[in-house]
Image: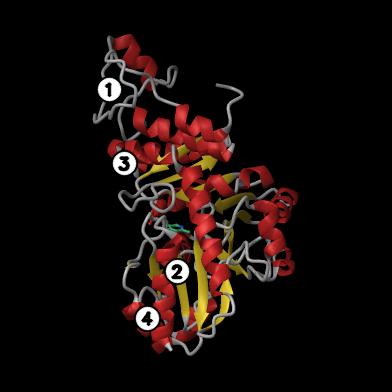
Amino acid sequence: MDNLHPETLAIRIQSERTAAHEHSVPLYLTSSFVFDDAEAMRAAFADETDDNIYSRFSNPNVQEFVDKLCALEGTEAGFATASGMAAVTASFLALLKTGDHLLACSSIFGSTHTVITKYLTRYGISYSYADILRPETWESLIRPETKMIYVETPSNPALDLIDLEWLGDLAKRHSIILNVDNCFATPALQQPAKFGAHLVTHSATKFIDGQGRVLGGAVLGKKELIHEIYLFCRSTGPALAPFNAWVLSKSLETLSLRMERHSASALKLAEVLEGHSAITQIRYPFLASHPQYAIARKQMRAGGGVVSFELRGGLEQGRKFLNAIRMCSLTANLGDTRTIVSHPASTTHAKLSEADRLAVGITPGLIRISVGLEHIDDILADVQQALEKSR
Ligand SMILES: *Cc1c(COP(=O)(O)O)cnc(C)c1O
C-alpha cells in the first residue's frame, strides 16, 4: 500500500482479518493475548517479536487506529491514549525531567495549562509562556535547559496561528523537541511533522471522532521519542480502550470528507457574519481579514471547523446569545456533527478573574462556534436570529 494517498490509507489500513474473513475490522475486546508455548511467550516479553501481550501495552484495534493516524500525519510511529489530556501529559512526563524547561505558547487548552503550571512544576520542570502573537520574543525565552516547545495552532478559542515553518526552524537550531497539539486542524488540514514538528499530539475526542461519542488521544512522531512515550505509558497505564479505538479508527475513514464540509460551512458562516452590526470582530483562519491569513494559507489546507467572534457589548450579550439559540447545542465539546456554541466568559472560564481570562484570549463577549455538518442555511438562521436577540 506504499503509493496510496493518506485519505485512502485512512480507509484501507486494517489489522489482520480473522478466520471469519470479515470485511470491516472486528472488535478485539480482550485484556490479554495467549501464547502457544513458553518460547513464544519469552520472546514476546523480551521484545524479540511484536506479538500483543496485554491491552495496556498494545491491542490490534488501538494499533490500527495509530497506523491510520500516522499515515495521515506523515509520522513514523505513535501511541494512543484514553483521552487527549492523557496524550499531552504522557508526552511531557515521558520526555521531561527535573531541571528541564518547557516553552509553551500563551493560549493553550485549559487543562494543559493546569498540567504545566500546577503539576509539572511539582517535579521541578519549569515553564515559560511565549506570546503567540509576538514570535520575535520567543528566541529570548529559550534557555540551555529548554527541552520542549509546546504549541497549539490554531489556538482555542482565539484562533491565533503560529508559523510552523518558522517554529520548526527555531526548534531545530536549538535542538529542542517541537510538540504541536493538532486538535483544531487535524491531519486532514495540517501536518505539523512536515514543518519539523517532532511530536504531534491529539485529542481524538474532537474532530477525529467527530460525532461526540468517545474520548481518545494520541501522540505521533519520531520513533525514538514515541518509544520513550510507549515505555512510560506501558508502565503508567493511560491506554486507549479497544472499543474506543475501534470507533475512532472508523471515524478516520471519513475525517477528510468531514473536515472539508466543516471548513466550507465555517467559512460561509464567517463570511456572512463579517460586518454584522451585533459583532465587533470575527475570526476565522481562512477569512482574508484574519491578521495571520497568509500563515493560514501557507500551512493549512482549509480553515477548520471553528469560528469565533466578539459580541458588541460583552458578558450580558453573551448570555443573551446563548439563551436565544434554538437548534445549536450548548455544550463543552467541539468537533461534533452538531453545531456547538459556547460563551467561555460566562461558562467554562467563569471562575477565572477577568484579567486571567484576558491573558488566555477570552474577552467578555467572545462566542466560539464549532460548526457542525447540518445544512449551512439552518446553522446560519439559528445564529442570525440569536444575534438579533443578543443586542
Ligand atoms: C479537548 C482538547 C484537549 C484535551 O482532550 P481530551 O480528549 O478532552 O482529554 C487538548 N487540547 C485541545 C486543543 C483540546 O481542544
Q: Which tag, 2 or 3, sits closer to the chain's start?
A: 3
Q: Quick one: SS at disc 3?
A: helix
Q: Amino acid at mark 2?
A: Leu
Taking the spot 48% from the left edge, 63% from the top edge, the residue there is 116
Q: Is residue 305 visible?
A: yes
Work out how far the residue at label 2 is from the one at label 4, CA to CA, in angstroms: 23 Å
Identify residue for label 3.
244
Work out how far the residue at label 4 is from the one at label 3, CA to CA, in angstroms: 32 Å
Q: Which tag, 3 or 1, sits closer to the chain's start?
A: 1
Identify residue for label 1.
33
Cβ(mark 3) to ligand 1 < 8 Å? no
Q: Which tag, 1 or 2, sits closer to the chain's start?
A: 1
Q: Which mark is residue 346?
A: 4
Residue 57: quarter of image: top left
Q: Single out the mark in the foreground, 2 or 4.
A: 2
**Residue 198 versus residue 294: which sits nearer the camera?**
294
Q: Marks 4 and 2: in contact by CB < 8 Å?
A: no
Q: Amino acid at mark 1?
A: Phe
Q: Single out the mark in the foreground, 1 or 4.
A: 4
